[in-house]
Image: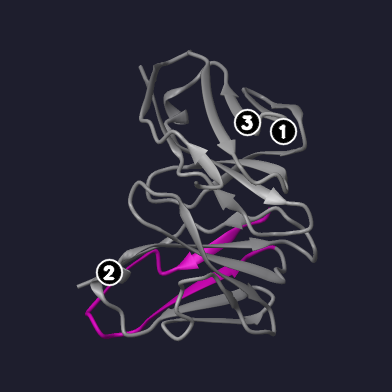
Amino acid sequence: QKEVEQDPGPLSVPEGAIVSLNCTYSNSAFQYFMWYRQYSRKGPELLMYTYSSGNKEDGRFTAQVDKSSKYISLFIRDSQPSDSATYLCAGLTGGGNKLTFGTGTQLKVEL
Amino acid sequence: GAVVSQHPSWVICKSGTSVKIECRSLDFQATTMFWYRQFPKQSLMLMATSNEGSKATYEQGVEKDKFLINHASLTLSTLTVTSAHPEDSSFYICSAIPGQGGDTQYFGPGTRLTVL
């Protein structure tokens, strides 16, 4: 079983839709969770960084962590074509610096 | 801030040759840098952790004699793929952590290696 599981997609939505991207994880030692956005043939860009359970909002993006069910989510409101990319979730243990990534979900926002 | 660059962005080489990829933190000092490999439609797989002034720590299954890592300064780490073979063709991405003891990784734009 992979430590971080993510549906690879592709997920296709119309412009303006609310997008929900999800990951599950198995490592109970993860304390920090990140969402990265990766455009084709580019390096990942940090979008959201959360610690422990709860929600964190930044503009159109909301990250949600539920440690009891080992489930993390990223919501994108008012999705735009420029949001089309691969979204990677990652977990990090406390005191460590080694990220464990999911496989990424490919998102397409269509006009 | 927190910009990481890589050079070259794309390289093609013949089988059996060696290729060096540079990773630089442009506006911060990075005690720790990481090297990842990413195959098409797959996630990033950590190859090694590079610490300035010491030997790199390689992940299980990664050949340290094939993937030579040198972290000679607080702003530069290099990955040399020695005796490259077509199966080494991949997207190589580095990341760096600003300062000391932080945990947010900032990624470079990646280097696409094609071995003929």
Front residue of this view, candidates B27 and B56: B56
- Residue B109's label in the rendered image is none
Residue at image coords 19%, 73%: B116
Where's residue A28, x and y in %? Answer: 70, 44
Residue at image coords 54%, 29%: A22
Residue under pointer 2: B87
Tell me the SS state at disc 1: loop
Tell me the SS state at disc 2: helix
Residue under pointer 1: A67
What kind of residue is marked 1? Lys
Residue at image coords 40%, 36%: A8
Q: Is residue A24 above or below residue B54?
A: above
A109 left or right of A36 in image: left
Distance between mark 3 and mark 2 Cα atoms? 35 Å
Closer mark to the observer between disc 3 and disc 2 = 3
Distance between mark 1 and mark 3 Cα atoms? 6 Å
Q: Is residue B13 above or below residue A3?
A: below
